[in-house]
Image: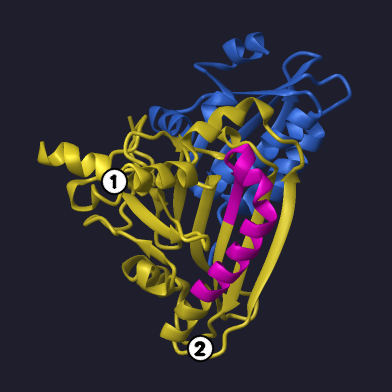
Amino acid sequence: MELPVATMDVRHATPRVAVVDIGGEVTSHCEEALMDAYERASTPGTQGLVLNFTGLEYMNSGGIGMLVTLLVRANRQKQKLAACGLSDHYQQIFELTRLDEAISLHPDEQTAVAAL
Amino acid sequence: MNASKDDSNWAAKIDRLSVTDDVAKAGFNISGRRPAGAQQGFGRLWQRRYATDLGTAISPEQVVADWKERFPKYWPKGATMHLALTGMTPGTVNPIALASGAGLTISTGIFVLYSDEECFTFMCPEGHMFAGWITFGAIESDTGSTVAEVKMLMRPSDPLYELGWPVMKRKEDVFWADTLRNLARDHGVAEALVTETTTCVDRKRLWHNWTNVRHNSGIKSAWHVVTTPVRAVRARA
């Protein structure tokens, strides 16, 4: 069985806010890649992370669980999470699963960074 | 706008659960409730996995298809799922009756959040013992055999259920092991070995969600029983 492929690129929008560009297929198979991206994003001064889903092609329910695990890790470091670039479909999934109550949703990266 | 390939796998967005007429009577305790993800719960966050090897005679996709079709059949005695006509279709709300072991039947349910060929996921309603998600699926192991698994990411939903976690954990161990053994027996594996792993993902309790106790399904179920005569009188009036 072919495993789904996700890309997770990390950059810093400001000294306090990192951006993780998530693309491809997000499932529980990507947990290691996502946690690795988090480790790279989470420098000593990082207070917020923006998850940029512009390149997201597919997500299953395992992907939601993975985001909750990421949220817990970030909260443990007193960091906030925000998301941007979600299509209407994925925005509705965030709202349906009530992830949007913990990860704020924004129309674009600039707004997300400003919110953090 | 291009459709995503998982569009039909997810339930449509809803704010509150709606029980269909065919299971309305059993769904009294979940109709109108909101779905509750792990961050809407109260207690510590647990990731749990139960798994059993079904051998090579059946593919993961066939196991999942059979599991969706016969889901209530694999449940052990003491638990009943009132399957709506739409079964495991994303968006379906299926009421559940659970024997609590204290003479009370707890009425709750689940919401089918996601379904594809490899797995299907339930989300709990407010008031359920847990807040979060439970996924049933099958994968191909490194040796080529099919492994059926039940995976959970959930918190006890309120302080009472958090206090009861040690008991609930043990009940879950028995329940899901029996479920997987029933599934395995139905697929030709007579004495299936079930493995279990549990990880505490978040030791922190979400104290601001203590008010979830107002939806507690055990309390609501007991109240429903106590007030049955009153409802009967009102119905006749």
Asked if residue A48 lies left or right of residue B93, the reply is: right
| Secondary structure at numbered mark 1 | helix
Q: Residue at x 52, y 79 (%)?
A: B181
- Whether residue B170 is in magenta: the answer is yes
| A91 to B53, vertically: above or below | above
Percent position (x, y) of residue B132? Answer: 54, 44
Asked if residue A93 lies left or right of residue B156, the reply is: left
| B181 to A106, vertically: above or below | below
Residue position for label 2: B189
Residue B165 or residue B22, whichever sits in front: B165
Residue position for label 1: B228
Say which chain is blue: A
Does label 1 or label 2 sit earlier along the sequence? Answer: 2
Instruction: Kindly identify which chain the residue marked by label 2 belongs to.
Output: B
Instruction: Kindly identify which chain the residue marked by label 1 belongs to.
Output: B
- Whether residue B200 is in magenta: the answer is no
For the magenta stretch, what is the residue range?
B152-179
Percent position (x, y) of residue A102? Answer: 60, 26
Q: Residue at x 76, y 13 (%)?
A: A14
What separation in Å lies between label 1 and label 2 (alpha carbons)? 44 Å
| Secondary structure at numbered mark 2 | loop
Three-letter amino acid code at the position of disc 1: Thr
Asked if residue B76 lies left or right of residue B38, the reply is: left
